Amino acid sequence: MATIQIDSDSQVIGAAESAAIEKKPKLGESCDHCGQPAALCCSGCVESPTLGGISPPRTFYCSPKCQRAAWDIHKKICSTLSARKRVYRAGNMIQKIFYAYRERAFEKMFTKIEVEGDTMYMYEGEYGEDQYLVPFPHDLFSSEEDKWAAFTFHACSDAVAFMCHLLKMFLKGLYVVIDEVEMMKLLKTPRETCVVDQNRIIHDRNEYRHEVFRVVLKTGEMYALDFSGAQYGYHDPVLPWDTYVQSRLGGDPRRIKAFHSFGNMYALNEKIAQTPGLFGTTMKVNLALSKATTSACEHFAGAKKKRSLGDCLKLPQATFLSERDELIDHITKELRTWHAPDYRKEVMSCGTDFQQVLLDMHLKG
């Protein structure tokens, strides 16, 4: 459907097509500028997420002329709601991309899954002597939520390290700063995910930290982006920062251990990749896969759709959902056919107890 561009974030239906709609305006809707019956909704801020149980207002106009005339007044709230909508859309897309990424980069050899109440136990088997990637055992899991928990177990650092470039591209022009936040284990979680090692020792998330992004927008709003919350039973990747601290850290800011600059975890993994042995090799594989993931996303948006990743977030809701699903399918297929570099000789020449190094790496994350 043709559109008239008011600015980069706000559009209304073209006048030629709106005429027919204006004859049958929605009951109760009036033009925000002149008060006449109106059927055209500002697409820049429509479909913005509901926060705190309060739905954002939908702004209607009777014509593009009235929208232009009201723009100076509407611009501030429209920009805020539009940015909010795009952050939530970006978080949703990147979380799904991260799951596809983790499926291909999976490195844990599980042989049995047991779910007891709100706790999932994943039993670890023996690893091959040169095995640093493992096919994901889809048949062991009874639900998508269980798979997501397995993808993200001990993978919060991976989410921050290897999704940072995508996050930056999706949110280009929207943010002032993005921090990488290191915190203690989340509190009062809906579920627990544990690994049972070969010695039948149970390892859960109580032993380890958690990491997320904090995004400060130009509009002043601040959000937590958590792509690995499924291991705790959390599946919403975006929350207002204060809500995240209150609901997942018990409102205690002392549970936040450190704020790191954006790209810190990726740079750390680049250094680890230079070390000999299995841990360094695994980082090399993840770095290569991260670049392949980013390239596949850019190719889909640029070569196939002729737009940037950020522009994908501005599409009308139905178009966005269709394109989001198409992108996820594209990434999943690309990653499933991706061939990891062969580092087996390098791993075997490290001269260490391979099995012990591998177990330590998987359990300590």
Image: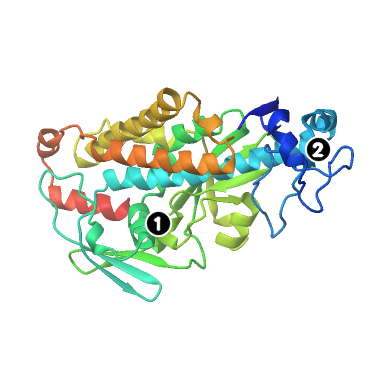
- Camera-side mark, 1 or 2: 2
Q: How many tags in the picture?
A: 2
Name the residue rendered at 40%, 30% in the picture.
Answer: 300
Q: Which of the pair 238/271 is nearer the observer?
A: 238
Q: Residue at x 48, y 59 (%)?
A: 234
Earlier along the polypeptide chain: callout 1 or callout 2? 2
Q: Quadrant of residue 303?
A: top left
Q: Amino acid at mark 1?
A: Tyr
Amino acid tagged 2: Cys
Identify the element where label 2 is drawn. loop
Estimate how packed mark 2 is, as few (under 14), some (14 to 19) or many (20 or more) residues with alpha carbons within 10 Å: many
Nearer the observer, 205 or 44: 44
Residue 197 is marked as: none
In the rendered image of this protein, does residue 109 appear above or below residue 46?
Answer: below
Question: Rounded to the nearest whole Å, what is the CA distance between mark 1 and mark 2?
Answer: 56 Å
The x, y position of residue 160, in whole percent, is: 44, 42
Residue 338 showing in the rendered view:
yes
The residue indicated by pointer 1 is 208
Q: Image quadrant of residue 113?
A: bottom left
Image x and y of residue 47, in percent: 64, 46
Q: Quarter of the image holding residue 38?
A: top right
Point out which mark residue 62 bears. Answer: 2
Relative image position of residue 8 (x, y in whole percent): 66, 27
Residue 183 is left or right of residue 52, and the answer is left
Q: As drawn, is 135 to the left or to the right of 59?
A: left
Please indicate whether residue 97 sits to the left or right of residue 219 in the image. Answer: left
Under circle 1, the secondary element is: loop
